[in-house]
Amino acid sequence: MIIFNILTLFPKSFINLKEMGLLGKAYKNKIFDVNIINIRDYSNLSANSVDDKPFSGGPGMVLRPDIISNAIEKNFTQSYIDSCIKICFSAKGKQLSQKYLEEEISSNDFILLNGRYEGIDQRVIDYYHFDEISVSDVILNGGEIASQLFIESFMRLQPGVLNNEKTHLQESFSQDLLEYNQYTRPNSWIAPDKRTIVVPSVLTSGHHADIESWKRDNALENTKKNRPDLFKKYLKKNKNE
């Protein structure tokens, strides 16, 4: 069983994590568990304050290292801390990617540190050797949404979570390509403006080679249009094809 130890100021953000969809099923099947730790419970300051003004000046408040460390030390042994994969979600971290999920981390227990306000004192990040991870080139109010995104994207790669274990092999980002477009019934859909829009005929032709060729071409088209950076990477890697 994989355990996600989540340090947060907003424990209620994770209420539905164990109840919805495939993650809820995986939780009931004891594939993973979640241990929520409220950072504020480990503050001895007035009104359980957890932050202070940055020494560098500027707007916002910074989470104090002593309180975060107190939360970690009172919940885990040193050997357990050392054995865990430790991640802090931060806009200045390295970018989360499918490759990172599939190749750079293993199925250990995790300690996920969720920042708020202007950020977290760098000393506690460095002391415990947290990997700083950014889930997107956008700014969030805190790490809670990033944690949920990380847990779902990591867990769906684990055995027993997806109904079809091969699903992730043909999804976006596999082989540096975005996924091809998907269609289902009805074959002829009458849109609100009364136009009839049909599924690409090749997908209903029954010719498997033609279908696979269409999927490949459509994946290339989607990647070129929506992620030219990935398309350039793909062309460089496959220049001899």
Image (cartoon, rainbow, N blue to C red):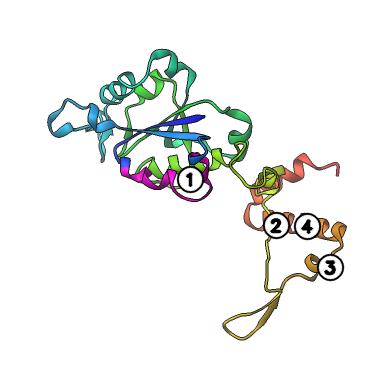
Nearer-the-camera pick, 51 or 40: 40
Secondary structure, mark 2, is loop
Q: In the rendered structure, are the residues bearing label 3 and label 4 in contact, judged by CB atoms less than 8 Å apart?
A: no
Residue named by callout 1 = 24
**Horizontal side, residue 19 vs residue 104: left or right:** left
Look at the image and say whether residue 54 sits in the magenta stretch.
no
In percent of the image, x 65 and y 49: which residue is there? 172
Nearer-the-camera pick, 9 or 177: 9
Q: How dense is the environment of label 3, judged by Cα within 10 Å: few (below 14), some, or many (20 and up)?
A: few
In percent of the image, x 40 and y 13: which residue is there? 78
In percent of the image, x 32 and y 18: which residue is there? 73
Q: Earlier in the sequence, mark 1 or mark 3?
A: 1
Residue lying farthest left?
46
Residue named by callout 4 = 217
In percent of the image, x 79 and y 68: which residue is there? 204
Give the spatial CA distance, label 3 vs label 4. 17 Å
Give the spatial CA distance, label 1 vs label 3. 37 Å
Residue 118 is tagged as none
Residue lying farthest top?
79
Residue 205 is tagged as 3
Q: In the rendered structure, are the residues bearing label 1 and label 4 in contact, judged by CB atoms less than 8 Å apart?
A: no
Give the spatial CA distance, label 4 vs label 2. 8 Å
The amino acid pointed to by label 2 is: Tyr
> Where's residue 148, x and y in %?
45, 43
**Height in image: 38 above or below 213?**
above
> Where's residue 205, x and y in %?
84, 68
Secondary structure, mark 3, is loop
Numbered label tally: 4
